[in-house]
Image (cartoon, helix red, strand yellow):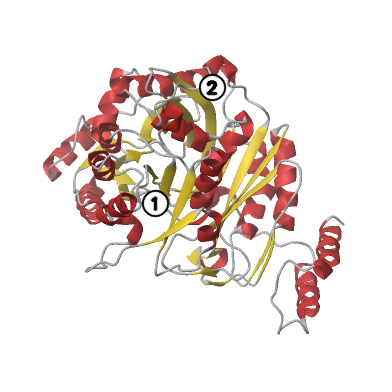
């Protein structure tokens, strides 16, 4: 059997837009994508975008969320004779035990080996690997800090501010910033307690805290034949509570010399780790142009489309081909950086209520179209946004020849992106792209707190347009609200108003 014939079907152990994204590539490759129906989302849109749907098995206990239930997911693949499992991002995508169970049952796990997931998920081991690869790092503890006395001693050695991080952490959990000696005791116990709750592991480590850095990440890809290349970098500094909200590629902070240094460091780390599959090496960049290793994510990232836009490569296809044992189809010299791309995460959140989740039904939906515009969506008209899952319902990805052009095109696309029935982060995205500091590229991870006067951008005559839209819907209450042709003139009117 040839390598390319190994994977004939893939169970997508995820939901929403990423499940659709994986299904699209699998189908393009002649592979059957299989989706999982849950009782929480029996009529979810992503189920219409796969070739086969399987129901999540009945369980005696329902205390484990469906997409975190390792044994049930493995059982689904075995029962239905599915060759491989793609975990997407989040959930079990970086769970070594899930990869182990897949391997034990003869199922191909589309991702790194369990050993690599374990090593890079352990922040202490990851730092040791980075040191061997001569990757720059911030000073701190050599391993986990197991006692308060040890934490106090390290704080005296490296000084303040410092940060306490969960060894098995991610997503900002188990993380505390300490600015003075009197805070050490409280922050140490708080971080350890949260780490235990979130990751079932109370271990923490300590490192010097970098005030207001830029967050730069490098996409790498490596096959089983010893080939490791990078696919350039992404800028991810627009964050709220360590959660990314808007990303772009490449980064406006890097010149060619610094870009080469940081991408070389990422490849060096991947080689030192014996890495195989798609992965992301994350760095902090200070105001002097010095960068430091932060962590490595052993999965496809939410923001992977911006890399696809500037390289023309399908990252999911690369993942699948590597899992099949194939060589990379491209060399480092052949990876060209083409233009600029921005991704806006469209979350079902009320920005004016501190980004609180917003649930409800999508009553009307209009998606932007045109050159350089891509929308990865997980909802359609009639979809219900529930409290059971992540609030991200779509991603707007825009590409243009340079940064100024892509900012302009993204704003135009956001003006055309209309969702009724729930509140979303679109007004926030507009506020970012209208912000002078963002447009100049002089922002860092403190951007939202320091540089945004308002997190909501209000269009000119927005209230007038809202009234016109309401009038246009009057009399249609007994009909399904879809992307109706008679609404087009109103959308055009709105754009004319905004451009006045």
Horizontally, is 114 left or right of 430 in the view? left
Position of residue 348 measured from the top left corner of the image (x, y, whole percent): 54, 63
Q: Is residue 285 visible?
A: no
Residue occupying the point 45% across, 67% down: 41
Residue 352's place in the image compared with 433, above or below, is below
What separation in Å lies between label 2 and label 1 (alpha carbons)? Answer: 35 Å
Report the front residue among 34 and 266. Answer: 34
Per the image, label 1 sits on a secondary structure element best described as loop
* Secondary structure found at label 2: helix
340 relative position to 113: left or right: right
In the foreground, 299 or 400: 299
In percent of width and height, residue 222 lies at 42, 24
Mark linked to residue 109: none
Q: Are marks 2 and 1 in contact (CB under 8 Å)?
A: no
Write down the residue under mark 2. Answer: 259
Earlier sequence position, callout 2 versus callout 1: 1
State the quadrant of the N terminus: top left
Of circles 2 and 1, the one toward us is: 1
Residue 226, image x, y percentages: 38, 17
Place residue 124 in its image quadrant.
top left
Q: Residue at x 64, y 72 (%)?
A: 363
Above/below status of 236 relative to 416: above
Q: Residues within 10 Å of mark 2 (few under 14, many from 20)?
A: some
Mark 1 = which residue?
13
Q: Quadrant of residue 223?
A: top left
Q: Quadrant of residue 401?
A: top right
Residue located at (66% from left, 33% from top)? 340
Q: Residues within 10 Å of mark 1 (few under 14, many from 20)?
A: many
Left or right: 94 as drawn, with respect to 240: left
């Amino acid at each position: 059997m040839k390598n390319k014939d190994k994977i004939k079907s893939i169970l997508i152990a995820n939901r929403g837009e990423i499940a659709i994204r994986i299904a699209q590539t699998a189908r393009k490759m002649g592979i059957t994508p299989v989706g999982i129906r849950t009782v929480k989302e029996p009529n979810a849109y992503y189920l219409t975008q796969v070739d086969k749907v399987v129901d999540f098995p009945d369980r005696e206990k329902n205390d484990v969320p469906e997409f975190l239930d390792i044994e049930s997911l493995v059982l689904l693949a075995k029962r239905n004779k599915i060759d491989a499992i793609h975990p997407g991002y989040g959930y079990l995508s970086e769970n070594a035990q899930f990869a182990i169970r897949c391997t034990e049952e003869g199922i191909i796990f589309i991702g790194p080996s369990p050993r690599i997931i374990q090593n890079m998920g352990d922040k202490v081991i990851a730092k040791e690997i980075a040191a061997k690869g001569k990757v720059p790092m911030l000073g701190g503890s050599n391993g986990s800090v197991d006692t308060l006395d040890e934490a106090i001693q390290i704080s005296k050695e490296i000084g303040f501010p410092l940060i306490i991080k969960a060894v098995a952490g991610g997503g900002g959990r188990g993380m505390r910033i300490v600015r003075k000696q009197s805070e050490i005791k409280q922050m140490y116990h708080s971080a350890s307690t949260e780490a235990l709750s979130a990751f079932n592991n109370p271990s923490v480590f300590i490192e010097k805290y970098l005030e207001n850095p830029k967050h730069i990440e490098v996409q790498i890809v490596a096959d089983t034949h010893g080939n490791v290349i990078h696919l350039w970098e992404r800028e991810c500094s627009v964050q709220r509570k360590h959660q990314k909200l808007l990303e772009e590629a490449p980064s406006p902070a890097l010149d060619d010399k610094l870009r080469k240094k940081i991408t070389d460091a990422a490849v060096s780390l991947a080689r030192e780790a014996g890495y195989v599959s798609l992965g992301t090496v994350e760095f902090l960049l200070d105001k002097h142009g010095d960068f430091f290793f932060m962590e490595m994510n052993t999965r496809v990232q939410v923001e992977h489309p911006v890399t696809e836009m500037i390289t023309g490569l399908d990252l999911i296809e690369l993942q699948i081909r590597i899992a099949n044992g194939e060589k990379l189809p491209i060399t480092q010299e052949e990876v060209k950086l083409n233009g600029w791309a921005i991704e806006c995460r469209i979350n079902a959140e009320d920005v004016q209520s501190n980004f609180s989740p917003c649930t409800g039904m999508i009553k009307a939906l209009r998606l932007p179209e045109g050159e350089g515009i891509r929308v990865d969506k997980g909802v359609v008209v009639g979809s219900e946004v529930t409290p059971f899952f992540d609030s991200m319902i779509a991603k707007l990805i825009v590409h243009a020849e340079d940064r100024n052009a892509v900012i302009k095109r993204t704003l135009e696309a956001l003006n055309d992106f209309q969702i009724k029935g729930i509140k979303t982060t679109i007004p926030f995205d507009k506020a970012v792209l209208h912000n002078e500091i963002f447009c100049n590229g002089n922002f860092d991870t403190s951007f939202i707190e320091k540089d945004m006067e308002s997190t909501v951008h209000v269009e000119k005559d927005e209230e007038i347009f809202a009234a016109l839209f309401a009038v246009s819907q009057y009399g249609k209450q007994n009909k399904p609200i879809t992307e109706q042709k008679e609404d087009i003139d109103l959308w055009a009117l709105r754009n004319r108003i905004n451009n006045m």
